[in-house]
């Protein structure tokens, strides 16, 4: 089989200076992720193939923000309290500009930094101006959208107060007007079904009364992090939420992030593929392969991936097995969409 060309739609990077609790509040001392992760590390991970009958060629990747530390909004100006996310953009600009080498400058096909979606639309507009200035003419064209990680808001009232607010809906509409997408990060497993049900309503409201060409593109992360051990009511509730999401135009799903949600007794490639097959089959049935894209979630995949530092390769093998299941009914053109074409379209990659 010839090499399979991949666009990896979900990777994270951070330099030495943000590889601790001062750079990321979620980084605790001694955890595997509390060290630099740059593209040279990614190349090594993505070239560790253990499958004897296939090979892959990573054409490029989409960078997704890493929830860097920032201060609580105060009377200080935006450039002060949002210094962490703005520094993240500067780091990305250096990669694109070639300061980490020519290969790195070509690898990042799309960038999805953080944005203050929980603030007023005036603040978001000001942030977009700052982000464009920080990115400069080389990196700004590669900024395809933004993410504000919602899954960490575990109090239902606080979550719903945010996503149902006029400001949040207006912010989503603003991204659509600027031809920028929004990466949706919610968590069915740890957060609850209410996170999915609430964000679906918010997504619907963001599209209501908006011309099709100005509707914000939604790119949903990690299958919404389902609980793969729940095959009864929880699975049904998740399916119902996916049905509603899939009916929204310009909405895509990432086939990624599953290692973090697996039952503890599931470890081999075949076991993992069998375990998550019902969820993946439902995504193909609702979204269709033209709206599903491969993402590795590197290096987060290494934390609970059974192959440790080799979990990028393990996840690609899981996806390969799933795409070859006869019941999925996928053509070779469908597979190309999942590995490459959907990410190309959703992120408007030149």
Image: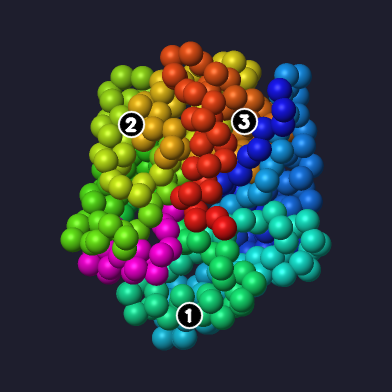
| Residue wearing tag 2 | 286
- Main SS of the magenta part reads helix
Position of the N terminus by quadrant: top right
Mark 2 neighbour class, 10 Å CA radius: few under 14, some 14 to 19, many 20 or more = some
Residue 99 falls left or right of residue 250? right
Earlier-in-chain disc, 3 versus 1 = 1
Earlier-in-chain disc, 1 versus 2 = 1
Furthest residue to the top?
326
Q: What element carries label 2?
A: helix
Q: Which of 37 and 134 is in front in this view?
A: 134
Highlighted range, magenta: 163-183
Q: Where is residue 334 in the image (x, y as percent from the top left)?
A: 49, 30
For the residues marked 3 and 1, what is the alpha-carbon distance in whole angstroms? Answer: 37 Å
Residue 238 falls left or right of residue 220? left
Residue 29 falls left or right of residue 178? right
Mark 3 neighbour class, 10 Å CA radius: few under 14, some 14 to 19, many 20 or more = many
| Residue wearing tag 1 | 129
Find residue 7 and report its image quarter: top right
Residue 245 falls left or right of residue 186? left
- Seen in the picture, residue 8 relative to 278 is either above or below; the reply is below
Q: Is residue 302 visible from the viewing direction of this image?
A: no
Confirm whether the magenta stretch covers residue 321.
no
Q: Identify the image's colour scheme: rainbow, by chain, secondary structure or one colour.
A: rainbow
Mark 1 neighbour class, 10 Å CA radius: few under 14, some 14 to 19, many 20 or more = few
| Residue wearing tag 3 | 315
Q: Is residue 4 visible from the viewing direction of this image?
A: yes
Which residue does the image show at 53% across and 42% down from the upper left?
341
Earlier-in-chain disc, 2 versus 3 = 2
For the residues marked 2 and 3, what is the alpha-carbon distance in whole angstroms? Answer: 22 Å
Position of the C terminus by quadrant: bottom right
- Seen in the picture, residue 69 relative to 34 is either above or below; the reply is below
């Amino acid at each position: 089989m010839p090499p399979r060309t991949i666009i990896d739609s979900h990777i994270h990077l951070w330099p030495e200076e943000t590889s601790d609790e001062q750079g990321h509040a979620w980084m605790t001392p001694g955890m595997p992720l509390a060290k630099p992760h740059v593209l040279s590390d990614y190349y090594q991970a993505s070239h560790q193939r253990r499958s004897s009958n296939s090979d892959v060629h990573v054409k490029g990747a989409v960078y997704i923000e890493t929830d860097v530390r920032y201060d609580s909004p105060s009377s200080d100006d935006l450039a002060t309290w949002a210094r962490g996310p703005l520094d993240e953009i500067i780091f990305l600009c250096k990669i694109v500009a070639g300061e980490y080498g020519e290969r790195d400058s070509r690898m990042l096909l799309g960038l999805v930094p953080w944005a203050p979606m929980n603030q007023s639309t005036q603040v978001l507009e000001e942030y977009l101006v700052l982000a464009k200035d920080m990115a400069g003419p080389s990196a700004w064209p590669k900024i395809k959208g933004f993410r504000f990680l919602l899954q960490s808001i575990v109090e239902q009232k606080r979550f719903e107060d945010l996503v149902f607010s006029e400001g949040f809906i207006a912010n989503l509409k603003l991204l659509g007007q600027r031809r920028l997408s929004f990466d949706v990060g919610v968590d069915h497993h740890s957060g609850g079904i209410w996170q999915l049900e609430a964000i679906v309503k918010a997504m619907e409201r963001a599209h209501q009364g908006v011309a099709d060409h100005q509707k914000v593109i939604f790119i949903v992360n990690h299958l919404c992090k389902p609980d793969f051990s729940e095959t009864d009511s929880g699975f049904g509730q998740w399916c119902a939420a996916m049905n509603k999401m899939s009916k929204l135009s310009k909405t895509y799903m990432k086939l990624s992030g599953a290692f973090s949600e697996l039952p503890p007794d599931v470890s081999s490639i075949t076991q993992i593929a069998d375990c998550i097959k019902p969820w993946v089959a439902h995504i193909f049935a609702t979204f269709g392969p033209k709206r599903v894209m491969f993402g590795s979630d590197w290096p987060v995949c290494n934390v609970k991936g059974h192959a440790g530092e080799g979990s990028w390769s393990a996840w690609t093998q899981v996806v390969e097995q799933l795409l070859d299941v006869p019941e999925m009914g996928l053509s070779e053109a469908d597979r190309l969409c999942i590995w490459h074409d959907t990410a190309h379209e959703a992120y408007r990659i030149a």
